[in-house]
Image (spheres, rainbow, N blue to C red):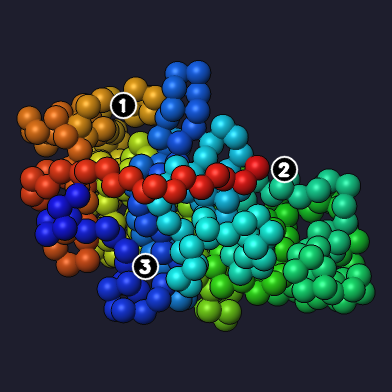
Amino acid sequence: MSETAAVSGRGRAAEAGATPVLDVRNLRVTFDTDDGRVRAVDGASFSIAKGEALALVGESGCGKSVTALSILRLLSRPGRIEGGEIRYRGRDLLSLDESEMRGFRGNRIAMIFQEPMTSLNPVMKIGDQVGEPLRIHRGASRAEARARAVELLDLVSIPDAASRVDDYPHQLSGGMRQRVMIAMALACEPELLIADEPTTALDVTIQAGILELLASLRERLGLSILLITHNLGIVAEFCERAVVMYTGRIVEEAPVEQLFRDPKHPYTRGLLASLPRLSSGASRLSTIPGVVPDIRRLPAGCAFAPRCGDVMEQCHAAVPALMQTGGESRARCFLYGDARETLRETPREPESSE
C-alpha cells in the first residue's frame, strides 16, 4: 500500500498520539474449505479510543462477526487468524498463550452475542450465570457472586432483581434476556464491550430500550464499545465513527456525521440511498444493482466493481488502497487516487483458539 496516498484507518486515538484501547492492524482471517482457502477478513485496520463507540457496518457475510470473534480469539476451525495484530492497550493479544488470553476474555474485553437464548445456559439460573465471570476472574464466593448479580441486574434495569436471580432464561422475555447478557458482560467491569447485533431479534420498542441502556452505561462506566450491525439507523444514533466492510475488506471509515452527510465509497452511498425516507415521496426504494459476490470466487480487482455505477477500467485490474478523502474520511476507491493495495504478509501465523 502506498504510504503517501493510503492510510491504515487507525482512528482518532492513534492520530492524537494516545494509546487506543483497541488497535487492530492488518487483520487477515482465513477459512479452509473444500474449495480451498478463503480469506474472510482481508487486511482490516481500525482502532477504538477510550469511551468511544465505533460501528462495524456491512451486509451479512462481509466479515463483521468474524472480526469480532477474532478480537477475542474465539474463532473455531476451520477458521484461523492468518496474520496481523490485535492490540489491547498496546499488548498484542495474538502473542498470548490461551491461559493468558483467558485473563482478558470476559474480564477486560467482554462480548454481547446476537441471540441471548442460544448464549444463555437454559438449565442454569440467571444469577449463577451473571455471577460466573466474577467467580472465574475475581475469585468471588458463591454468596458474593450472587449479591453482585443482583446489583448488576438492577444496573441493567431488570425489575425485582433480587427474585429474578433465581429465574431461568425461558422465564424472561427477549428484551430481558438481552439485558441479562449485558449484565454478564459488565460483571468484571471491562474496558471494551463488543456488541454483535445486540438488538436484531428484538422488536423496535425493545431495541430502543437496549440502545438507551448501552448509551447510559457507556456514559456512566466510560466503556469503549465496538458495535457490529447492519442497521445504519442504529449507527446514526449511537456511534461517533463507522467502519464499512464489503467482502472482508474495509471500504470506508469516517465520523458518523460525515459519513451520512457525504459518503465517499459507492457502496456506502448505495447503502444510504436504500434507506426508506418518509419525506422522499418515492414509490420504490433505491437498491444496489447485482448481488454480493461469493467470497470464495471474488472478481479480480475491486470486489464492488461489478455493481458500481462509477466503475473504471483500473477497478477490474487491481484493488484500490484505503485513501484519504477529506477530513477524517477514508475510502478504498480509485475515485480518490490511483494507489493500489499490496499485501503485507507477516512471518508469524498465530493459531486461533478452539
Q: Position of residue 124 (x, y in %)?
A: 87, 52
* Dot placed on the residue nearer the N-terminal end, 2 or 1: 2
The disc label shown at residue 189, or none: none
> Is 189 left, or right, of 277 in this rendering?
right
Q: Position of residue 207 (x, y in %)?
A: 57, 56
> Is 280 left, or right, of 221 in this rendering?
left
Disc 2 from disc 1: Cα separation? 32 Å
> Is 270 left, or right, of 63 in this rendering?
left
* Residue drawn at (44%, 27%) of the image: 37
Residue that carries the numbered disc 2 in the rendered image: 118
Q: Give neighbour class at mark 2: few <14, some 14-19, many 20+ (Cα, 10 Å).
A: few
Residue that carries the numbered disc 1 in the rendered image: 298
Image quadrant occupied by the C terminus: top right
Q: Position of residue 299 (x, y in %)?
A: 26, 25
Query: SS of the residue at dot 3?
Result: loop
- Could you tell me the amino acid type at mark 2? Thr
Q: Is residue 293 above or below residue 201?
A: above
Nearest-to-viewer mark from 2 and 1: 1
Residue that carries the numbered disc 3 in the rendered image: 240
Q: Give neighbour class at mark 3: few <14, some 14-19, many 20+ (Cα, 10 Å).
A: some
* Residue drawn at (57%, 81%) of the image: 220
